[in-house]
Image (cartoon, rainbow, N blue to C red):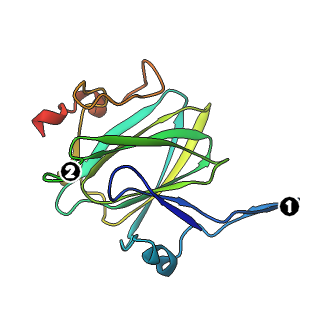
């Protein structure tokens, strides 16, 4: 397993050792002890599975009290995955970072509490799996406008397909 830091402290890129042969492939998706060695110490309690078509943009979502660490990966297709630092007092507060996650690259992104998260689908469709360190709570759910000009996220799609909820989120300054 290869682990890399992103330009924003706390975001970790994980590249598992993928073993391929004529039968297909095998890799270890998650091992608590191995991930803990590399700074992923969250205890995951919920797994989510998202299926979306090309052009769908989900986000920017986060949860408060206590928030959720997430470990994101793609099992079919490709997405552009984005995390925004919303940790007040952080030297990168209000900064975003993104990367392509796909079935082909098998990369995972660890997003700790204190980040808003979103992604857009680049392939015809995509299946995204992510582990969460706390249970979903509608009362704790929050979001930020996906196209906030102050964040200036360089989404690689135009005119995304959005949910009503995602359309109505406030801008970053309002949170």
Residue 47, picture quadrant: bottom left
User: Residue at (88%, 59%) from the top-left corner?
Assistant: 22
Q: Quadrant of the N terminus?
A: bottom right
Upstream in sequence: badge 2 or badge 1: 1
Q: If the image is split into quadrants, where does the C terminus sit? A: top left
Query: What percent of the width, then of the height, locates residue 61?
Result: 30, 44
Give the residue pinned by disc 1: 23
User: Which of the 4 quarters of the picture holds residue 65?
Assistant: bottom left
Lateral position of residue 141 relative to residue 102, left or right: left
Whole-Å distance between the Cαs marked 2 and 1? 47 Å
**Whole-percent x and y of residue 5?**
43, 58
- In the rendered structure, the answer to whether residue 148 lies left or right of residue 45 reads left
| Residue visible at 42% across and 18% down in the picture | 159
The 10 Å Cα crowd at callout 1, few under 14, some 14 to 19, many 20 or more, is few
Tell me the element at label 2: loop
**Residue 91 marker:** 2
Asked whether 136 or 97 is in front, the reply is: 97
| Count of numbered marks | 2
């Amino acid at each position: 397993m290869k682990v890399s830091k992103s330009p924003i402290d706390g975001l970790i890129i994980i590249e598992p050792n993928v073993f391929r042969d004529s039968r297909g492939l095998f890799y270890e998706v998650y091992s608590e002890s191995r991930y803990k060695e590399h700074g992923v110490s969250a205890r995951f309690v919920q797994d989510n599975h998202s299926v979306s078509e090309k052009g769908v943009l989900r986000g920017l979502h986060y949860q408060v009290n206590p928030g959720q660490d997430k470990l994101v990966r793609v099992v079919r297709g490709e997405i552009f995955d984005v995390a925004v630092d919303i940790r007040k007092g952080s030297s990168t507060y209000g900064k975003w970072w993104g990367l392509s996650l796909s079935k082909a690259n098998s990369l995972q992104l660890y997003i700790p509490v204190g980040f808003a998260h979103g992604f857009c689908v680049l392939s015809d469709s995509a299946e995204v799996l992510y582990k969460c360190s706390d249970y979903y709570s509608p009362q704790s759910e929050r979001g930020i406008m996906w196209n906030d000009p102050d964040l200036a996220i360089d989404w690689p799609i135009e005119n995304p397909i959005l949910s009503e909820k995602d359309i109505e989120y406030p801008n970053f300054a309002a949170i």
